[in-house]
Image: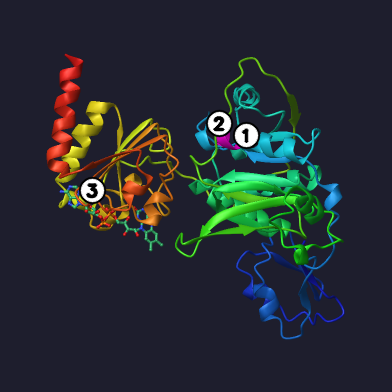
Amino acid sequence: MAIQVIKDKCKGCKLCLKACPFDAIDMDGKVAVINEKCTACNQCIAACPFDAIEKTGDDAAVDLSAYKDVWVFAEQRNGKLMNVALELIGEGRRLAKEISEDTKVCALLVGDGIDHLEQECYEYGAERVVMIQDPLLKNYTTDGYTKVIVDAVEEYKPELVIYGATHIGRDLAPRVAARLNTGLTADCTRLDIKVSSYIEYAKNNTTLDTSTLDPNDPSTGIKQTRPAFGGNLMATIICPKTRPQMSTVRPGVMQKRDRVAGATGERVDYKPQISESDIRIQIKDIVKSAKELVSLTDADIICSGGRGLGDPSGFELIKEFADKVGGVVGSSRAAVDAGWIDHSHQVGQTGTTVKPKIYFACGISGAIQHLAGMQTSDIIVAINKDPDAPIFEVADFGIVGDLYKVIPEIIAEWDNAEE
Ligand code: FAD
């Protein structure tokens, strides 16, 4: 527990009970007691006029050596693993082996009736599966998943836990990090092992500034890199004092390992301690969006349109193009902001990160925030009437011209080739 009441100072005034938004304080006689619903939000500390509540553990030294292994939150929905989970299992395996030969990558599966997913995790690189199942975990809830994951992490002590930066991952990871009183780096695009500064120096002694060497730093850790300041610089963040280290990673950034049919691993069943009272929300109904669903992260070919389309009807041409080449429609933020297409199509820093085999950028200038979401595509084809457009700097093939002339010609050529 990161918040505690100093019994001698507590006067039993109950102001903290009124301030707590989570119903996380009870009275034991005349003394307030923090219960397990506490999220360490600090509201009670601010409300107490007697300085009788304090945060603990922040500066307490954590025994880093007690933590081992890399965990991947293997997000599943309706009994199907998300692509990003498989990508992260591959990345987790790479990191685990860089840490040490006996560090294992573990897939953390949470849900109900999901035994069938275990094998897929091994086949994509997991060496162990930690399975947490309960009828109360059938559908994702922040409270339910947070509780069981925090309990499991406290029991098994992984040194790194990574999540996909999906809607669920972005909701869950901060809550788990707060409960565990550890750090979280959101939206990472790269993870590396940080070795002790001396080892790093020995490896790269031409580049490292020796004045930064800390002879008392024997630690390893993860260097978590993410775009900052609107994508204008990349920040590398470490979590040197607390464990586990935690990151969310954008879908489509890491590589899946090749699937190895029949691969096996070790299964650990963790029996969750969870009851209905732990979950403050009730799911009455799940209504799927009526919007056309786009799966940009899984697409092999993406045809994206930008402000260069001129008006929303330009997306009819992009759709025709995408249908012809077997792709899906993407867009720049300018087109989304103009109301020409739904945000679910947006590629880029504040949209989806994609890595298709072919990315067509049509009437897109190539702003850094757009590039952040597509520049690792295998092949980039840019169509733009401005020969100096920055998109041509990352394009493998560039066509300078009016997209309303170029795209119909490509479609016609495609038809000819099919005949
Ligand atoms: P423009 O920059 O206006 O480019 C239009 C291009 O079309 C021009 O190069 C022009 O030469 C060309 N063109 C015009 N007519 C034709 C024609 N007939 N044929 C061919 N070419 C033509 N942007 C994103 O895309 N995704 C993001 O996730 C994203 N996140 C952002 C986050 C932040 C914090 C900020 C500040 C910005 C973000 N942006 C994002 C916006 C980004 O900076 C750019 O404004 C945006 O990408 C520009 O979109 P565009 O290339 O379609 O438009």
The image shows residue 227, relative to residue 192, as above or below, that is below
Residue 410 lies in quadrant = top left
Farthest bottom residue in view: 49
Q: What amino acid is found at the position of numbered circle 2 in the picture?
A: Lys
Residue 415 lies in quadrant = top left
Mark 1 and mark 3 in contact (Cβ < 8 Å)? no
State which region is magenta: 85-89
| Disc 2 secondary structure class | loop
| Disc 3 secondary structure class | loop
Mark closest to the chain's N terminus, 2 or 3: 2
Q: Position of residue 76 (x, y in %)?
A: 54, 35
Q: What amino acid is found at the position of numbered circle 3 in the picture?
A: Gly
- Residue 338 shown left or right of residue 138 in the figure: left
Q: Position of residue 306 (x, y in %)?
A: 25, 50
Numbered tag placed on residue 256 in the rendering: 2
The image shows residue 122, relative to residue 386, as above or below, that is above
Mark closest to the chain's N terminus, 3 or 1: 1
Q: In percent of the image, x 67 and y 56: which residue is there?
A: 177
| Residue neighbourhood size for the residue with mark 2, other residues' Cα within 10 Å, grouped as few (<14), some (14–19), many (≥20) | some
**Residue on which disc 1 sits:** 89
**Residue on which disc 3 sits:** 363
Q: CA distance from mark 2 to mark 3?
A: 31 Å
Q: In percent of the image, x 85 and y 48: which residue is there?
A: 66
Ligand 1 image position (quadrant): bottom left
